[in-house]
C-alpha cells in the first residue's frame, strides 16, 4: 500500500491522549534539522503546540499562556518552505463537530490529512486518570471510573474524556470534517513500537528509520502512591484557594516534572482497574471497533487488538489495597513545591 501523501499536504495528528503521542512528537521535535533536509516542516517551536491546539479545538487557554498561538501557528504553516507539514497535538481531539470543521478549514480542506492513533481503551483508562490528577483533579480512581461509566451525563468532572475516547465518534467526527478518504487510523502495536514512526515516515516521504524518539522520564506511568500524593496535594491546593497560574507554573510545569524523575521501587503498587470497569471497557471497545470498521476511513493495523483484555496484574480493586504514602515521597514533593 502506497502511503505517500501529495506534496503540499498538512498532516494533522490529533491523538487522542495516551496513544503514543509523546513518542511521535518527541521524534519530530528532536529531529527538526533532519526533517528540514527532506523538506518536511514540524509545526510549532516546542514538542507540541498545546496552547494553539486548545484554542483551536475548544477555545480554551492554558493559564499564563497566550491565546493567540493558533493564528501564529497557522501563519507558520503557511510560510513553511517545505513539501509537507506535520502538526501533532492530542488536544485537537477536544474539538466538537463545529470546531473540527473549523480546524480543517483553517489548515485548508483540500490539503489536510488527519491521522488518529488508537490503543485499547482498557489501557488508556488508568493512564488518563493519573494525567487528570496531574492536572488538578481530586477524584479517587474508583470514584472517577463510576462517574465516567455510570454518570457521564451528570458530572462536570473531566468533561472531555468521552469526546477524546469514544474513538468511533472521534473517527466519524473528523471524517465528516476532512472527508473519509483523507483520514487514516493507525492501530498501535506494542510489540512493534517503531511501526508508528515508520508509517508516518512513509506518509511524509521520509527515509525509513529517520525518526528516533528519546525516552522521556516525564512520560512514564505513575505508581499508585505517587498519584495519591498528587491527589492529596490537589486537595490542599483547592482548600487554600491558590491560583491556576500558580498551579501551572509551580506544579504542572514544575514540581510534577521533577517528581517524575524518581525511580519507583519495583514493589511500589501500580494502578489496577476493577473487573467491572475492565468488562465495560471491553464491551464498549467491541462496539467502537464495529463502528470504525464500517466508517470508510483507511485503517492500518488490526482493530481487534483494541478489544484485548489486560494482563491479570493490571486488574484489581484499588480499594482493597490501602496506599501508604512514604516519607520519601512526601519529602520529595514538598521540597519541589517549596523550591
Image: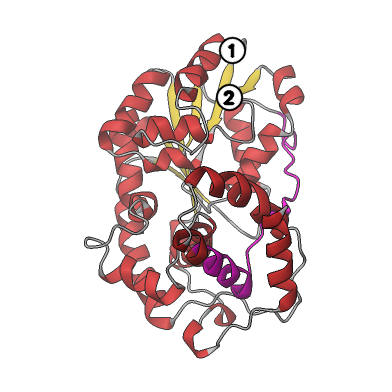
Counting from the top left corner in percent of width and height, residue 3 is at: 54, 32
Q: Residue at x 51, y 37 (%)?
A: 89
Q: Nearer the viewer, residue 43 or 257?
A: 257
Crowd class of label 1 (few under 14; some 14 to 19; many from 20; radius 10 Å): some
Q: Nearer the viewer, residue 269 or 242?
A: 242
Cα distance in 3D space between marks 1 and 2: 9 Å
Counting from the top left corner in percent of width and height, residue 244 is at: 48, 46
Visible residue check, residue 317: no
Counting from the top left corner in percent of width and height, residue 203 is at: 57, 30
Visible residue check, residue 125: yes
Q: Nearer the viewer, residue 34 or 203?
A: 34
Counting from the top left corner in percent of width and height, residue 284 is at: 33, 65
Q: Secondary structure at mark 2?
A: loop
Crowd class of label 2 (few under 14; some 14 to 19; many from 20; radius 10 Å): many
For the rendered model, the colour scheme is secondary structure
Q: Secondary structure at mark 1?
A: loop
Q: Is residue 52 magenta?
A: no
146 shown above or below 137: below
334 shown above or below 22: below
Give the label on residue 240, or none. none
Image position of 132 (left or right of 85):
left
Q: Residue at x 72, y 50 (%)?
A: 216
Q: Are marks 1 and 2 in contact (CB under 8 Å)?
A: yes
Segment colored magenta: 207-234
Image position of 100 (left or right of 123):
left
Q: Which residue is mark 1?
A: 80
Upstream in sequence: badge 1 or badge 2: 2
> Looking at the image, which residue sits at the far front?
240
Give the label on residue 43, or none. 2
Q: Nearer the viewer, residue 116 or 14?
A: 14
Q: Residue at x 59, y 26 (%)?
A: 44
Amino acid at each position: 500500500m502506497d502511503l505517500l501523501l501529495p506534496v503540499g499536504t498538512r498532516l494533522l495528528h490529533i491523538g487522542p491522549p495516551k496513544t503514543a503521542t509523546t513518542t511521535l512528537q518527541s521524534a519530530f521535535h528532536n529531529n527538526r534539522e533532519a526533517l528540514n533536509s527532506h523538506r518536511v516542516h514540524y509545526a510549532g517551536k516546542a514538542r507540541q503546540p498545546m496552547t494553539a491546539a486548545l484554542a483551536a479545538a475548544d477555545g480554551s487557554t492554558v493559564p499564563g499562556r497566550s491565546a493567540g498561538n493558533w493564528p501564529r501557528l497557522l501563519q507558520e504553516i503557511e510560510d513553511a518552505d517545505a513539501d509537507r507539514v506535520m502538526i501533532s497535538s492530542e488536544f485537537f481531539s477536544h474539538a466538537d463537530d463545529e470546531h473540527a470543521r473549523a480546524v480543517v478549514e483553517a489548515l485548508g480542506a483540500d490539503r489536510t490529512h488527519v491521522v488518529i492513533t488508537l490503543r485499547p481503551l482498557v489501557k488508556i483508562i488508568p493512564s488518563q486518570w493519573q494525567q487528570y490528577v496531574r492536572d488538578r483533579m481530586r477524584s479517587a480512581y474508583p470514584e472517577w471510573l463510576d462517574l465516567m461509566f455510570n454518570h457521564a451525563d451528570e458530572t462536570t468532572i473531566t468533561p472531555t474524556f468521552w469526546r477524546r475516547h469514544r474513538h468511533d465518534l472521534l473517527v466519524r467526527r473528523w471524517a465528516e470534517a476532512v472527508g473519509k478518504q483523507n483520514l487514516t487510523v493507525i492501530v498501535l502495536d506494542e510489540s512493534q513500537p517503531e511501526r508508528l514512526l515508520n508509517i508516518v515516515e512513509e506518509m511524509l516521504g521520509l527515509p525509513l528509520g529517520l525518526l528516533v524518539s528519546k525516552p522521556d522520564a516525564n512520560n512514564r506511568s505513575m505508581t499508585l502512591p505517587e498519584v495519591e500524593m498528587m491527589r492529596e496535594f490537589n486537595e490542599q491546593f483547592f482548600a487554600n484557594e491558590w491560583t491556576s497560574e500558580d498551579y501551572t507554573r509551580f506544579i504542572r510545569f514544575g514540581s510534577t516534572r521533577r517528581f517524575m524523575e524518581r525511580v519507583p521501587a519495583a514493589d511500589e503498587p501500580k494502578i489496577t482497574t476493577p473487573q467491572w470497569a475492565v468488562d465495560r471497557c471491553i464491551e464498549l471497545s467491541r462496539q467502537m471497533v464495529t463502528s470504525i470498521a464500517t466508517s470508510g476511513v483507511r485503517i492500518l493495523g488490526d482493530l481487534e487488538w483494541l478489544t484485548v483484555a489486560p494482563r491479570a496484574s493490571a486488574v484489581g480493586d484499588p480499594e482493597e489495597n490501602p496506599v501508604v504514602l512514604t516519607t520519601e515521597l512526601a519529602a520529595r514533593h514538598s521540597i519541589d513545591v517549596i523550591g
